[in-house]
Structures are given as structure tokens and as C-alpha cells.
Amino acid sequence: FPVTIILAGLRAFFPPEMHEIRKIKGGGYWAYLKHQSIRDRLDEVCPEWEVAYSSIESVGADVSVRCSITILGVTKQSIGAVPVVAAVNKTGDDVSVGSASDRVRAEAFKNACEEWGIGRYLDD
């Protein structure tokens, strides 16, 4: 496939039902795509894509990792960083969904995919 066709497929809008909406502190909402939906888009448009992650590093109360996505020999990468404890209930217990390593890998993956244009329209 020509690169222009692949890029158009990656950058295409997702159907409305694939978007998730989350309330944010201070009011307002944040629209996002689940990393599984993004992975499915890569599989549909360019099944030969590759992903690689750096080692996870601790930085204060956060963890970070670099994700690289390679398509047709071209690599784009980005960093993900998340708090080790993302959510604490009233008694101080960690109620984060998934481990910090799972969350940071998903965050870095989504950020690297945005470098390819996937879901970039959500920033507008």
C-alpha cells in the first residue's frame, strides 16, 4: 500500500460509539479512545506494524516508558507517564484500575499512535 493510503486510514475518525467520555476535575469532559480500539485500527490498516517499549523507569511518584511504533520501516515514538497510585479512596487504599506498568504502557502506546495521527483529532 502507498504511505498516503495508510496514513489516511490511520487518521480517519473513529465511529462515535468507540469514543469514551470521562469527567475531569474542575468540570468538563475528556474524550478518548481505548488502546484496544487503536490497536484494532493498526491491525486493519497496516497489519505489519511493530511496537517496542523501553524499560519502565520510576520518576518520583510516577513511572514512565517510551513506546515506538514502526510502520513500513518508519518509527515514531512517544513517552507515557502515570502515577504509581492513580486513584485513592477515602480510606487511602489504592483503587487504581490495572497496575502502574499496564497503565503506563497503554498511555505510551496511545501517545505513540497519536504521532501517527490516530485519534489526533481529539486534541482539537
Image: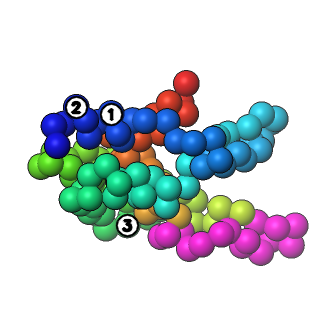
Q: Which mark is residue 56?
A: 3
Based on the displayed image, in which of its 4 quarters is residue 49 positioned? bottom left
Amino acid under disc 3:
Ile
Q: Position of residue 78 (x, y in %)?
A: 34, 46
Q: Which mark is residue 4?
A: 2
Amino acid under disc 1:
Ala
Q: Secondary structure at mark 3?
A: loop
Q: Position of residue 96 (x, y in %)?
A: 67, 68
Residue pointed to by mark 1: 8
Amino acid under disc 2:
Thr
Residue sitting at 65 percent across and 69 percent down?
97
Q: Which mark is residue 78?
A: none
Q: Is residue 96 magenta?
A: yes
37 versus 23 height, above or below: below
Asked whether the beta carbons under mark 1 and mark 2 sit within 8 Å of each other, the answer is yes
Give whichever of discs 3 and 2 has the lower sequence position: 2
Can residue 121 be seen at all in this image of the molecule? yes
